[in-house]
């Protein structure tokens, strides 16, 4: 019997040159039929011809696929042959096409790089070189599908040579590649001073590199926004940039020309190398070398440097021309504002920070920040999901009964939309307590909703339970206009659900939230939680948490020694505590000195505080007491520095072992005792050892409570799901993991989304859906 094959391939198969590739391998195996896009992340292939060529075709499908393509599933159907005599790429049928996935931006591929370094190539030194396997995608898209006329490349008409490549099926990388261009027809570069006056130069990239080498600070228009570039090797320049940017200590990322240069700065193992060189080209946090040429002011007080490789021809050529071959490349924004994507913003916001601008005329349509990844217990975890990763959708193991828009939280957050069996997170948005950033959230929510057919008037809106979040105000504005329903979700329930659904898990689960701030059901600030969630009906139960501690005002977040003393005030009377403050000179760690501490203690005596079980606050307090970091200038700083400080510490057995008490059926971790013990130990133990032990034991005790919830039960999944801003802390996660390993329970961190609030909107939609199922 004669038969044809219909093959459905699912994965990242659109916007990566996949259909031309299929066309090619069909012809080389003398097979006929067609290839076309059928869903957002699927292509359908029909082949018929000599049977012996079918298996060769399937082999080629895997072994010769374009580098950025990812094949998740291949389904093969046997069909009646139709007598095709040619092979064609069919246009997607508008009506049948469900949703076309918005492809993420891809870093420059090795072949495009080779071309711009080859003096005999017509694209020699061409900053915007790209092909079907690389280049901007989402950042330049006005709408789906990814066709040239829907991108900001549409204004550049292909020259005859480019057109020939575009229409030549044997041109592996440029046939039907939507974003291609050349020096003749593509975007142009120029350089200006800080007021926008054009500087006359033949080679803007060379000139920019020279200016940087001379110590000037430049704004550089890149792929998803503006960067600020400056020498990373010169203390004075780094400090000048810090002063101009009003950013005293928050680390800057460093871009290195290639892996060889990067190895001079940081330790790079095989896992890290693969990440750095992947098409996503993220910033990866890696341990600094002792003899690194990078100024210590680039990431003060930290053990790790954020390093990444050039992801456009522009970046590569620029770095190549500099003396150092590595530079600070930090987001071009003013403190708390979104990164600039256009010239108006750049000259207004960055004019006072930089000396010169390197600009091009391709419009950046969608802002995408650089993605950031770190390793926790040897596994890569996202800290910021931007370029290269967003907005890839996340397929969930069931079909949503409604359409949803989730608004995330307020800091370092991202929103999401949900439809069918898909949830699409926006790229990293930032801190929406700033109005311009909130505006950006609105823009990208609308962009996704529009392109994926989620009507703003039909979607259910999902918000964090916190009554004062700005993200909630945005949702309320939508509801006022479109009349939507709003569902509230407890912060840590959303975190845990995010992790579970990222791994495709559905069932009765237990999770641990290791976090800074999340509004609790009782009005307290939660953040060290063990929660059981029944995904069959959306109900949940708090199994245990860190002991409630008094937090007096926002000042205690910025000056965490205040929190440390607030905790001690529960056990030590006023006078004795003031003696202790003087003995350790702790009043030096607040602005107002002894007087401020007097006022603090009086506030607590009068009951003027909120209760918190936050892990972040607890770690910050330790960081301040041990003298590691006593002022927070960016989110998480004291806790992040405590982790960095611990790198030379060892675990102390039998010290700082937290007690658990049970109250109203909940396990409470007695953290006051831990702080008391720290005071006893601080003069006799190495501070690094205390830091290690404290963090590890917090993880251990949370793991213990989770184990208690799972032990002896059959109706619960025997894995523990972790989420929250501090859920990437090596010592805490090791503590949880080691404890649970003894009982053969696996600990799960998210992989496709950040564990922090950048991933929370995923869990928010899941929670809303679970409550919909049982609430008709
Ligand atoms: Zn390429
Ligand atoms: Zn051309």
Image (tube, rainbow, N blue to C red):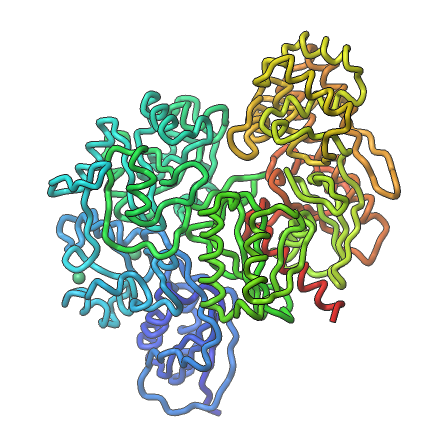
Image position of 525 (left or right of 646): right
| Residue 59 horizontal/vertical position (percent) | 43, 69
Instruction: Give the quarter of the image for residue 82.
Output: bottom left
Tell me: residue 40, above or below residue 492. Answer: below
Tell me: residue 154, above or below residue 334. Answer: below
Image position of 379 (left or right of 276): right
| Residue 542 horizontal/vertical position (percent) | 78, 47
- Ligand 1 placement by image quarter: bottom left
| Residue 218 horizontal/vertical position (percent) | 27, 36
Image position of 312 (left or right of 622): left
Q: Residue at x 20, y 47 (%)?
A: 117
Tell me: residue 715, above or below residue 345. Answer: below
Q: Residue at x 60, y 49 (%)?
A: 750
Total labels drawn: 0
- Quarter holding the C terminus is bottom right
- Residue 421 visible: no
Instruction: Give the quarter of the image for residue 586.
Output: top right
Q: Residue at x 54, y 35 (%)?
A: 635
Instruction: Give the quarter of the image for residue 261.
Output: top left
| Residue 652 horizontal/vertical position (percent) | 71, 22
Q: Residue at x 19, y 52 (%)?
A: 188
Image position of 591 (left or right of 428): right
- Residue 617 visible: yes
In-front residue for pair 272/224: 224
């Amino acid at each position: 019997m004669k038969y044809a094959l219909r093959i459905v391939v699912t994965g990242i198969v659109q916007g990566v040159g996949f259909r031309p590739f299929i066309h090619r391998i069909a012809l080389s195996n003398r097979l006929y039929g067609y290839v076309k896009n059928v869903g957002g992340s699927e292509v359908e292939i029909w082949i018929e011809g000599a049977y012996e060529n079918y298996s060769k075709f399937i082999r080629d499908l895997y072994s010769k696929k374009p580098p950025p393509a990812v094949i998740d599933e291949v389904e093969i159907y046997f069909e009646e042959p139709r007598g095709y005599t040619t092979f064609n790429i069919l246009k997607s049928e508008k009506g049948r096409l469900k949703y076309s996935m918005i492809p993420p931006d891809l870093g420059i591929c090795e072949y495009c790089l080779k071309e711009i370094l080859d003096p005999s190539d017509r694209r020699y030194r061409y900053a915007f070189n790209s092909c079907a396997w690389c280049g901007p995608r989402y950042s330049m898209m006005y709408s789906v599908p990814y066709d040239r006329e829907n991108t900001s490349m549409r204004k550049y008409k292909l020259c005859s040579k480019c057109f020939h490549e575009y229409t030549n099926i044997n041109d592996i990388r440029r046939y039907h590649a939507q974003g291609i261009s050349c020096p003749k027809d593509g975007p142009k570069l120029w350089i200006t001073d800080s007021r926008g006056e054009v500087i006359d130069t033949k080679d803007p990239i060379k000139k920019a590199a020279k200016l940087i080498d001379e110590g000037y600070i430049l704004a550089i228009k890149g792929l998803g926004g503006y960067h600020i570039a400056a020498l990373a090797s010169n203390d004075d320049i780094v400090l000048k940039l810090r002063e101009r940017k009003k950013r005293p200590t928050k680390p800057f990322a460093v871009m290195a020309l290639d892996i060889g240069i990067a190895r001079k700065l940081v330790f790079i193992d095989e896992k890290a190398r693969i990440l750095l060189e992947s098409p996503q080209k993220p910033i990866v946090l890696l341990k600094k070398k002792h003899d690194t040429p990078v100024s210590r002011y680039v990431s003060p007080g930290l053990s790790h440097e954020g390093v990444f490789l050039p992801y456009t021809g522009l970046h590569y050529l620029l770095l190549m021309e500099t003396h150092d071959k590595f530079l600070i490349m930090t987001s071009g924004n003013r403190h708390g504002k979104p990164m600039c994507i256009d010239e108006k913003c750049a000259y207004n916001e960055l004019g006072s920070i930089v000396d010169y601008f390197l600009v091009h005329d391709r419009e950046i349509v969608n802002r995408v920040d650089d993605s950031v990844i770190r390793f926790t217990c040897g596994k890569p975890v996202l800290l910021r999901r931007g370029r290269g990763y967003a907005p890839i959708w996340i397929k969930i193991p069931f079909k949503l009964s409604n359409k949803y828009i989730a608004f995330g939280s307020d800091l370092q957050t991202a929103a999401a939309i949900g439809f069918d069996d898909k949830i699409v997170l926006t790229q990293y948005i930032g801190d929406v307590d700033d109005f311009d950033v909130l505006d950006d959230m609105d823009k990208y929510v609308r962009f996704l909703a529009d392109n994926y057919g989620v009507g703003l008037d039909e979607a259910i809106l999902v918000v964090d339970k916190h009554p004062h979040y700005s993200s909630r105000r945005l949702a309320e504005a939508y509801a006022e206009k479109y009349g939507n329903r709003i569902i509230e979700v407890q912060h840590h329930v959303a975190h845990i659900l995010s992790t579970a659904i990222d791994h495709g898990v559905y069932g009765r689960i237990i999770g641990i939230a290791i976090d800074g701030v999340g509004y609790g059901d009782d009005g307290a600030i939660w953040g060290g939680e063990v929660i059981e969630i029944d995904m069959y009906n959306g109900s949940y139960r708090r199994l245990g948490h860190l002991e409630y501690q008094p937090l007096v005002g926002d000042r205690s977040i910025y000056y965490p020694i205040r929190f440390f003393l607030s905790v001690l005030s529960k056990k030590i009377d006023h006078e004795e505590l003031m003696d202790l403050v003087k003995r350790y000179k702790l009043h030096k760690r607040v602005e107002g000195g002894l007087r401020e501490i007097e006022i603090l203690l009086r506030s607590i005596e009068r009951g003027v505080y909120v209760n918190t079980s936050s892990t972040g606050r607890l770690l910050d307090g330790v960081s301040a007491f041990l003298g590691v970091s006593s002022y927070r200038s960016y989110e998480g700083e004291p806790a992040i520095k405590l982790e960095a400080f611990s790198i030379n510490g060892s675990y102390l057995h039998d010290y700082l072992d937290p007690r658990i008490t049970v109250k109203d059926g909940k396990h409470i971790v007695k953290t006051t005792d831990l702080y008391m013990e720290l005071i006893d130990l601080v003069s006799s133990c190495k501070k690094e050892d205390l830091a290690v032990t404290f963090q590890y034991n917090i993880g251990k005790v949370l793991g213990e409570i989770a184990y208690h919830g799972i032990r002896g039960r059959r109706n619960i999944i025997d894995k523990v799901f972790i989420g929250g801003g501090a859920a990437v802390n090596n010592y805490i996660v090791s503590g949880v993991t080691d404890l649970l390993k003894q009982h053969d329970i696996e600990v799960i961190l998210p992989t496709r989304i950040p564990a922090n609030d950048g991933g929370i909107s995923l869990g928010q939609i899941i929670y809303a859906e679970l409550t919909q199922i049982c609430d008709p």
